[in-house]
Amino acid sequence: MRRKKLSTEELTNGIRKGDRLVLSRAITLVESQRPEDMEQAEVLLQTLLPATGRSFRLGITGVPGVGKSTFIEAFGTLLTEKGLKLAVLTIDPSSQRSKGSILGDKTRMEELARNPNAFIRPSASGSTLGGVSGKTREVMLLCEAAGFDFIIVETVGVGQSETLVHGMVDFFLLLMLAGAGDELQGIKKGIMEMADAVVINKADGDNLKPAKRAKVEYQNALHLFPANLSGWIPQVKTCSALEKSGLEEVYEMLDKFKRKVKSNGYFDKNRADQQVSWFKENLTDLLRTSFFKKPEVKQRYEEKLKEVQSGKTPALNAAREVISII
Ligand code: GDP
């Protein structure tokens, strides 16, 4: 049984009041691929836009097992204790391909899930050509309009979605382990380069010493990267998500970052740049989809495909002949 559809006004009012059920319904709407839903979602986003943008957006990545959910549970609880309202959005690049999902098990972040000042939502990683992004950015805007002032976007560090998350957050935090070696952790140099901070988790028990050593090593490694446009020097911290130590230091670091980039203008500039990139990405996506939907394109595409397969027409020429339809 389908539930009664909420009107745009009902959705807007509910979100503005911070009604979590309405927020969930709005997220489902924004993620929907049905043309009438997409139309309503656009009106909703336009209406709510003035109420968005006021949160701090934190991206967290790290390989499975590094302790992301334990960290988010502990750090998120700390944030709510400071009076912040936290939304956690998880992007799982595996969920499209296999039905099973790395982040999907329901036992993750149980405590935070019960916290009245926290909202956790897995974000399907979209099926758009080339994009794994889905609608995480739009979901983030809805959460902001609903009064969440801290957003964590979490992704599994398996290489596909980090750039994407980096492009939608204010601060990009890489969780790592001591002693596992960069290659073992599957962290590519490019991802290290994007990080505003490397936080070495599980700095407890026997692992405390190696964690401290790793801190120095990462600090040295980060120094070799070109200076960050934000004027911020990437930091290395250690913490234990399990023992809840080092978390206050992470919070203070974020606060310091925020003050710095707000005063030097980078915060706003970065957000504006991110919006521009998102606009361009959407434009390319929409162009591609609407182009391939045209019947005459479909027909010529099939023709040219065969010609290319049989070696009759060079690939570039064939592509141009399809494009010449517009
Ligand atoms: P995720 O896959 O990155 O989300 O990792 P999880 O949060 O599920 O953690 C993986 C395992 O590491 C779990 O068994 C956790 O209890 C454990 N773990 C997480 N953080 C810590 C920590 O700070 N110290 C120790 N010793 N274990 C931790």
Image (cartoon, rainbow, N blue to C red):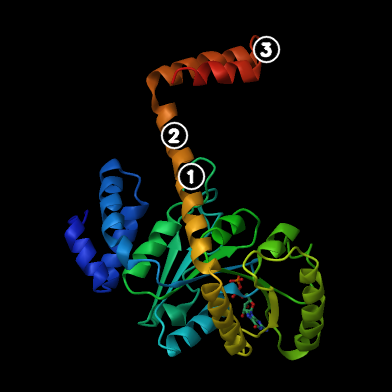
Judge the density around disc 3: few (<14), some (14-19), many (≥20) Cα neighbours within 10 Å. few
Sequence order check, earlier mark of 1 and 2: 1
Residue holding disc 1: 280
> Is the shortest distance between ligand 1 and the CB of mark 3 under 8 Å?
no
Judge the density around disc 1: few (<14), some (14-19), many (≥20) Cα neighbours within 10 Å. few
Quadrant of the rendered structure where residue 183 is?
Answer: bottom right
Give the image location of residue 271, x and y in percent.
Answer: 49, 62
Secondary structure beneath label 3: loop
- Any part of residue 98 in sight: yes
Spatial CA span between label 1 and label 2: 10 Å
Quadrant of the rendered structure where residue 188 is?
Answer: bottom right
| Quadrant (top left/top right/bottom left/bottom right) for the C terminus | top left
Disc 1 marks a residue whose amino acid type is: Lys
Give the image location of residue 186, x and y in percent.
Answer: 73, 61
| In the image, residue 216 above or below residue 51 | below
Q: Of residues 96 and 86, which is closer to you in this image?
A: 86
**In front of the other: label 1 or label 3?**
1
On residue 287, the disc is: 2
What is the total number of numbered labels drawn onto the structure image? Answer: 3
Disc 2 marks a residue whose amino acid type is: Leu
